Structure formats: C-alpha cells, structure tokens
Amino acid sequence: MKGREQEANAAFAEASSGTECRAEFIFYARKQASESRSVQVLGDYACDFRRSDWAHRWSDWNSGRNRYLNLFLCGKHARELGLM
C-alpha cells in the first residue's frame, strides 16, 4: 500500500491548486474484508483530493484506521488512485 500512498502524494503535489474539482463519488470507509464501493454524490462538495490534509485522510482511509471516514472524490482522482 505504500506505493499507492506515494502515488497519491505525488499526484497531490502535481495538482493545480487553482483548479477546483467537485466530488462525484463517495467512497465509504474501507473495511479490511471488503472492497471499496462508491455511490454518486447528490450534493455539491469539493473533491477531498484538494484538501490540505489529503495525505493524512488517504492514509487513514486506505489503511482502515478510521472506520468512519468517507472520501468524496471526483472521477478523475478516484481513477488515479485505483478506486474505479
């Protein structure tokens, strides 16, 4: 999983802070035995990938440390992270 975390950090560093992307999908808290699943976002939310604490949120979600953390991501970033 460390490779995926490094990819997420590298992608975050490359992301243009001037371009705001909107969340399209909610990825519910990951459980150890289940695959990630997503549902479409019905409201208007910013993509979590653009948050200043993204690396920490991704680490917590990806490792399953925070079982209440859901990720709000646009399709582009969800694909880059291998979630879709």
Image (cartoon, rainbow, N blue to C red):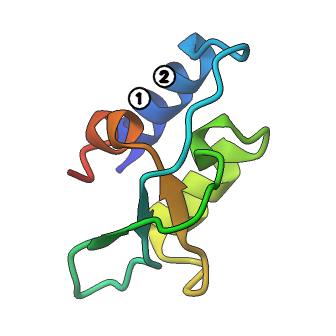
- Residue 19, given in percent of the width and then of the height, sits at 64, 18
Q: Which residue sits at x=56%, y=56%?
A: 59
* Dot 2: element: helix
- Residue 31, given in percent of the width and then of the height, sits at 36, 85
* Dot 1: element: helix
Q: Is residue 19 shown left or right of residue 39? A: right
- Residue 16, given in percent of the width and then of the height, sits at 63, 12
Q: Which residue sits at x=55%, y=53%?
A: 58
* Residue 82 higher or lower than 25, as above or below: above
**Amino acid at dot 2:** Ala
Query: Which residue bears the numbered disc 1?
Result: 7
* Residue 65 higher or lower than 8, as above or below: below
Q: Residues within 10 Å of mark 2 (few under 14, many from 20)?
A: some
Q: Is residue 26 shown left or right of residue 15? A: left
- Residue 56, given in percent of the width and then of the height, sits at 68, 52
Which is nearer the eye, 20 or 54? 20
Which is nearer the eye, 10 or 40? 40
Residue extending furthest toward the right: 52
Question: Which quadrant holds residue 43?
Answer: bottom right
Are the residues tagged 2 and 1 within 8 Å (C-beta)? yes
Query: Which residue bears the numbered disc 2?
Result: 11
**Amino acid at dot 1:** Glu
